[in-house]
Image (cartoon, rainbow, N blue to C red):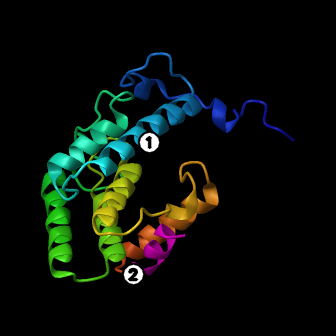
């Protein structure tokens, strides 16, 4: 039996508390929001890969997030000011972000592991911090892509699809992140190149 009150995935409304921070006032459906964000992310990807940036700096991290979401969210590029159930305490965002970047610089400089692993470890460290109100997974994957690219590797495929929409793929990604939480980076590395 079909639940008549359940909305199709593309008809899910953006919650009112989130709509207050939206720049385009016409967006009411999650599908509209996803399309708008995806257009911005594509534009930011092109911008980031066509220029020579230091992908392991706070200024670039903020600038990339701002580019990814600047036409969508008023808070684009700004660190979150509230605590969430994921990520570090808001007061630890900058120290942990700097720690992740210092580690990545060290790994690159000393070639502590292959380039793909450096980039995947960097991604894991960034997504663990969750510095922004939203978009942390997409931002940290693009940060890893840019670092891999700077290290002479192709961008990652991250399972080959949109993680927000594909349930099985998202579950696999989350499981790989949890393995990385326990210092097993092999599943995340395999997922990144799958």
On residue 12, the disc is none
Q: Which residue does the numbered mark 2 point to in the structure image? A: 184
* Residue 58: x %, y % from top left: 16, 51
Between label 1 and label 2, give the one nearer the viewer. 1
Q: Nearer the viewer, residue 111 or 69?
A: 111
* Residue 40: x %, y % from top left: 41, 35
Image side of residue 165 versus residue 39, left or right: right
Query: Quadrant location of the C terminus?
Result: bottom right
Look at 70% across and 35% down and name the residue there: 8
Which portion, as a residue range, is magenta? 185-194
Assign a secondary structure to mark 2. loop
Q: Is residue 85 above or below residue 15?
A: below
Magenta-drawn stretch contains 131: no
Q: Nearer the viewer, residue 154 or 21?
A: 154
Assign a secondary structure to mark 1. helix
User: Residue placed farthest to the right in the image?
Assistant: 1
Magenta-drawn stretch contains 189: yes
Q: Is residue 35 above or below residue 23?
A: below
Look at 32% across and 41% down and name the residue there: 133
Q: Nearer the viewer, residue 34 or 160?
A: 160
Q: Main secondary structure of the magenta part?
A: helix
Q: Which residue does the numbered mark 1 point to in the structure image? A: 42
Measure how far apart labels 1 and 2 are at the Cα level.
Answer: 30 Å
The crowd level at tag 2 (other Cα within 10 Å; few <14, some 14-19, many 20+) is: few
Q: Are marks 1 and 2 in contact (CB under 8 Å)?
A: no
Look at 58% across and 33% down and name the residue there: 31
Q: Is residue 148 above or below residue 190?
A: above
């Amino acid at each position: 039996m079909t639940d008549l009150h359940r909305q199709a995935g593309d008809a899910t409304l953006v919650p009112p508390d989130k709509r207050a921070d939206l720049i385009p006032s016409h967006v009411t459906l999650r599908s509209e929001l996803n399309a708008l964000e995806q257009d911005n992310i594509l534009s930011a990807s092109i911008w980031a890969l066509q220029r020579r940036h230091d992908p392991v700096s706070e200024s670039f991290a903020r600038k990339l997030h701002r580019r990814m979401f600047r036409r969508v969210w008023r808070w684009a590029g700004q660190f979150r000011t509230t605590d969430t159930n994921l990520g570090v305490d808001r007061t630890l965002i900058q120290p942990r972000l700097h720690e992740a970047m210092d580690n990545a610089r060290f790994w690159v400089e000393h070639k502590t592991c292959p380039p793909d692993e450096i980039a995947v470890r960097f991604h894991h460290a960034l997504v663990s911090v969750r510095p922004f109100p939203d978009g942390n997974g997409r931002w940290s994957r693009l940060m890893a892509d840019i670092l891999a690219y700077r290290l002479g590797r192709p961008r990652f495929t991250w399972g080959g699809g949109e993680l927000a929409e594909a349930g099985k793929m998202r579950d696999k990604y989350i499981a790989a992140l949890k393995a990385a939480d326990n210092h097993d980076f092999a599943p995340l590395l395999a997922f990144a190149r799958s």
